[in-house]
Image (cartoon, rainbow, N blue to C red):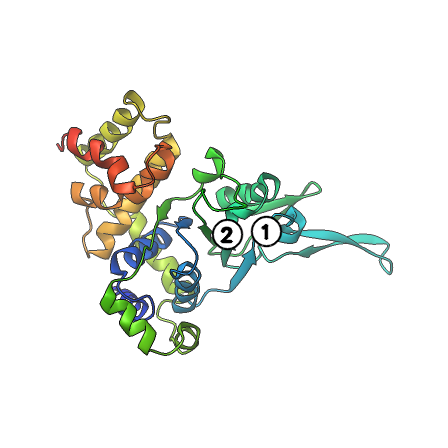
Amino acid sequence: MHHALHQLLACADTVILGKQQQIRLAVCCLLAKGHLLIEDIPGVGKTTLSHTLAHLFGLAYQRIQFTSDILPADIIGSSVFDSQQNSFTFHSGPLFNQMILADEINRATPKAQSALLEAMEERQVTVEGQTYRLPEPFFVIATQNPSYQIGTFPLPESQLDRFLMRIELGYPSRQAERELLMGQPRHSLIKSLPVYLPDEQLAALQHEVSQVHVAPALLDYVLSIIEFTRQSDYPCGLSPRAGLSLLAAAKAWAFMDQRQAVLPEDVQAVLPAVAAHRLLAASHDSAATVAPILQQVAVF
């Protein structure tokens, strides 16, 4: 299956040009059973990346365009009265798919944003006292415009903490953009992509990721990172959920490198994407946010 995973990454590289690191982080996030937040300006390929991953994994995909007037019922679904049965019948909304693109999530009001909280954490939704399970697997990829743009509502800390990773795509290099301008439209390429890792194989990979070994010394290193953030000048230290997310992402990163044990380098590779958005630092530069951690927390 590592061969199929390698092919999947290579295929994604042909669609999202010059962003190998971001693609690798996104796939790592899915293997760790996490949700992904992509924050960047419009037009750099955020939606294209999510659609590409859904196609390569063979997942049922649904895009939800978040706007200022969207309601929770537009996302989750609602109960409609059936006159023939003289009862209410629940009609599921677009959330009931395997991969959801919450496009421009921070253009919706906090009330609409909160519709995703239970779904992202528990893989279920509750409507009028009735609980409905979501499909397996279930992933949310949300795109977010920079906070300085008009018409955005900041995501609350509880919502940010539900995302295992936050990444940025940035502008492509000159050579990559040249290839983009000369090539065929990205949506045409996506339609022609094969499925490399369907449901069963993805589930098997996720199970293998969970079995990657974590040595006691490595666990102490992760704990030292967590404690450092709580004792430093960050507005908010890493929560226990953040620690679990960091460990899960490090396992997935090690697995992608075909290793059965986590190394400190794996933790360091995923730390900016996992920790920066949870630390609520003034800087939006993930690498700069976690730089003091990498410099001051000693490796065992």
Q: Which mark is residue 67?
A: 1
In the image, taking residue 201 as reference, residue 294 lies left or right, namely left
Q: Which residue is mark 2?
A: 104
x, y (%) of residue 3? Answer: 24, 68
In the image, taking residue 42 as reference, residue 91 lies left or right, namely right
x, y (%) of residue 111? Answer: 61, 40
Position of 223 relative to 30 (above/below): above
* Residue for point 49% across, 42% down: 121
Position of 109 relative to 60 (above/below): above
In the image, taking residue 283 as reference, residue 216 lies left or right, namely left
* Residue for point 66% across, 48% down: 71
State the image quarter where residue 2 is shown.
bottom left
Mark 2–mark 1 distance (CA, rounded to whole Å): 8 Å
The three-letter amino acid code for the residue at tag 1 is: Thr
Q: Earlier in the sequence, mark 2 or mark 1?
A: 1
Say few, some or many: other residues with alpha carbon within 10 Å of mark 1 (under 14 / 14 to 19 / 20 or more). some
Position of 17 relative to 74 (above/below): below
Position of 88 relative to 199 (above/below): above
The three-letter amino acid code for the residue at tag 2 is: Glu
x, y (%) of residue 150? Answer: 51, 46
